Image (cartoon, helix red, strand yellow):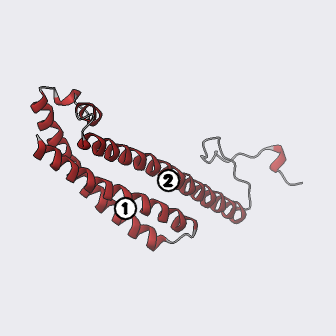
Amino acid sequence: MASLIDRLFDVLDEQTEYCKQLLELSREKKDVIINNDVAALQKITWLENMLISRNNRADKARLRAMNEMAAACGKAPAEFSAWELVGLLAGRPEGWRLAEAVSGICGMVDELHQANEENRVLIENSINYIDFSMNMIKEVLSGEPVYYTAAGDEMPRRRVILDMRY
């Protein structure tokens, strides 16, 4: 069981490092989005994909270790969590270390979610601004007003009394 716990710590340390790097990239991405640096955004996206791929491999190793520990404890793998293992290791240094590692990863995942949500809103606002600008240009070039539905779809053109020139 000690070797399984050591293996789990190795995997959790690896995943912690991936989470730190992803969080740093998400924070960088915010500035890149604001500055409209497309090349840097592509590079960050590539790096994020690479880190996510590596983290997925580490996560599979973590699941294997957790499944082996569940079997060693006589528990069903689906019902055995890291927090349950923390409870089983209560009072031992490994229990404290595991609780700290799991809490740290959970905290970073929450921060990552928040940073990604901010980036999503920034990108959404940029797209809305681009749509608005394109619609203004289209209206000026066509010489006629363009109307839109609440969903942002262009309405069929029809002349109303307010559009007629006398």
Front tag of 1 and 2: 1
Distance from disc 1 to disc 2, alpha carbons, whole Å, reads 13 Å
Provide residue 129's location: percent of width, then percent of height: 63, 59
SS at mark 1? helix
Q: Quadrant of the N terminus?
A: top left
Q: Residues within 10 Å of mark 1 (few under 14, many from 20)?
A: some
Q: Residue furthest right?
A: 166
Report the front residue among 133 and 103. Answer: 103
List the residue tagged with mark 1.
Answer: 21
**Left of 154 or right of it: where is 2?**
left
Query: Residue 148 location in percent, x, y?
Result: 66, 46
Q: Looking at the rendering, which quadrant does residue 16 occupy?
A: bottom left
Disc 2 target residue: 115
Q: Residue at x 41, y 50 (%)?
A: 108
The amino acid sitting under disc 1 is Gln
Helix, strand, or loop for circle 2?
A: helix
Above or below — where is 118 with respect to 95?
A: below
Q: Position of residue 10 (x, y in %)?
A: 20, 53
Q: Of residues 153 and 64, which is closer to you in this image?
A: 64
- Tell me if 52 is positioned left or right of 126 in this view: left
